[in-house]
Image (cartoon, rainbow, N blue to C red):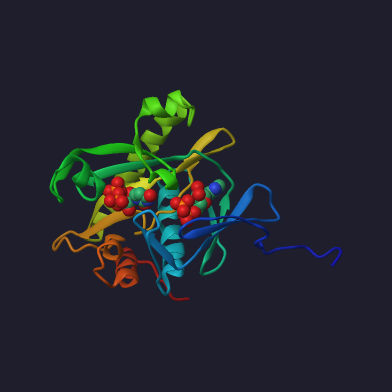
């Protein structure tokens, strides 16, 4: 109706549907809405399942972590929680690159280099991957990024610095609650010319182990068919002090 002030942010057009989230335009050309779905995928989309409550749990988990990062002075795309499954974010010009930092060996580094799982990495190791589902996200280096123009040299430097900063902040946060941050993946985008974090941070995109028992509390429970996937994500959240129910 003419003259009515619109106070709520509504989803408009679905721009993109990823493996676990969908991205929508909004009334504001500078903002997107991320919808966290229950879909869970692994092995380049070869294993896909719907896990009850996962969208809600990851949405709230992500909001909690983004606020911690902002408090630590790390700029992110997060604006605010809109509902159980929706978050408002700044629209970024994403770079097609995944930044992975590893504090302890697990996953692909063990397969690639033949090292056993669970070795401390001091200093933590950093790897770039190209975000390309058809190619299975191959590992790349800084020269590939610069030579193919996937990102500018100064942005590459900034992504590395920010990834290590996030790692330092979150490693401590999880350790205080009895968990080890084994590794994690981050993606970045440009906003008003600045490189800022444009990704979720949830147990879908990192590895977390109980400090004492080394029990896996992250998406490896899904990848390896260990069960209690969402229950473990909630357990991590509860230890951090996140309340999932309204
Ligand atoms: P994937 O692309 O790995 O399947 P998701 O299911 O998480 O990932 O889908 C989210 C998609 O939304 C990704 O392609 C990501 O680059 C994009 N995206 C996330 N946040 C933003 C943002 N703030 N601005 C623009 N694009 C974003
Ligand atoms: N990761 C992710 N999305 C990807 C690839 C990796 O979130 O497309 C995360 C993964 O959950 C882990 C870290 O990045 O926390 C390192 O993943 P790795 O290279 O070991 O690959 P994986 O064996 O997990 O496929």
Residue depicted at 50% across the width and 59% down the height: 21
Residue depicted at 45% across the width and 49% down the height: 199
Q: Residue furthest right?
A: 2
Residue 82 in the image: state x and y as whole percent: 57, 64
As displayed, is residue 165 above or below residue 172? above
Q: Quadrant of residue 115?
A: top left
Work out whether residue 170 can be spotted.
no
All told, the count of numbered labels is 0
Work out whether residue 141 can be spotted.
yes
Q: Is residue 43 left or right of residue 116?
A: right
As displayed, is residue 136 above or below residue 2? above
Q: On the rendered image, what quadrant is the N terminus found in?
A: bottom right
Q: Foreground: 79 or 140?
A: 140
Residue 37 in the image: state x and y as whole percent: 49, 66
Residue 28 in the image: state x and y as whole percent: 69, 52
Residue 116 in the image: state x and y as whole percent: 13, 48
Q: Is residue 124 left or right of residue 245?
A: left
Q: Is residue 101 left or right of residue 120?
A: right
Residue depicted at 34% across the width and 55% down the height: 43
Q: Foreground: 5 or 203?
A: 203
Q: Quadrant of residue 235?
A: bottom left
């Amino acid at each position: 109706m003419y003259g009515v002030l619109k106070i709520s942010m509504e989803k408009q057009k679905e721009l993109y549907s990823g493996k676990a989230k969908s991205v929508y335009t909004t009334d504001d050309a500078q903002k997107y809405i991320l919808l966290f779905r229950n879909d869970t995928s692994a092995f380049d989309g070869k294993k896909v399942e719907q896990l009850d409550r996962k969208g809600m749990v990851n949405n709230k988990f992500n909001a909690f972590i983004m606020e911690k990062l902002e408090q630590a002075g790390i700029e992110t795309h997060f604006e605010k929680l809109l509902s159980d499954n929706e978050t408002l974010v700044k629209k970024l010009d994403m770079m097609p690159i995944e930044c992975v930092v590893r504090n302890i060996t697990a996953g692909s580094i063990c397969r690639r280099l033949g090292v056993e799982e669970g070795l401390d990495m001091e200093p933590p190791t950093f790897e770039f991957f190209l975000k390309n589902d058809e190619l299975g996200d191959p590992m790349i280096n800084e020269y590939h990024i610069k030579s193919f123009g996937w990102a500018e040299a100064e942005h590459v430097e900034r992504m590395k610095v920010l990834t290590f900063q996030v790692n330092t902040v979150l490693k401590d946060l999880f350790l205080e609650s009895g968990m080890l941050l084994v590794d994690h993946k981050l993606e970045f985008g440009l906003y008003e010319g600045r490189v800022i974090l444009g990704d979720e941070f949830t147990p879908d995109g990192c590895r977390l182990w109980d400090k004492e028992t080394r029990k896996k509390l992250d998406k490896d429970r899904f990848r390896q068919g260990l069960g209690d996937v969402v229950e473990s994500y909630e357990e991590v959240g509860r230890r951090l002090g996140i309340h999932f129910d309204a």
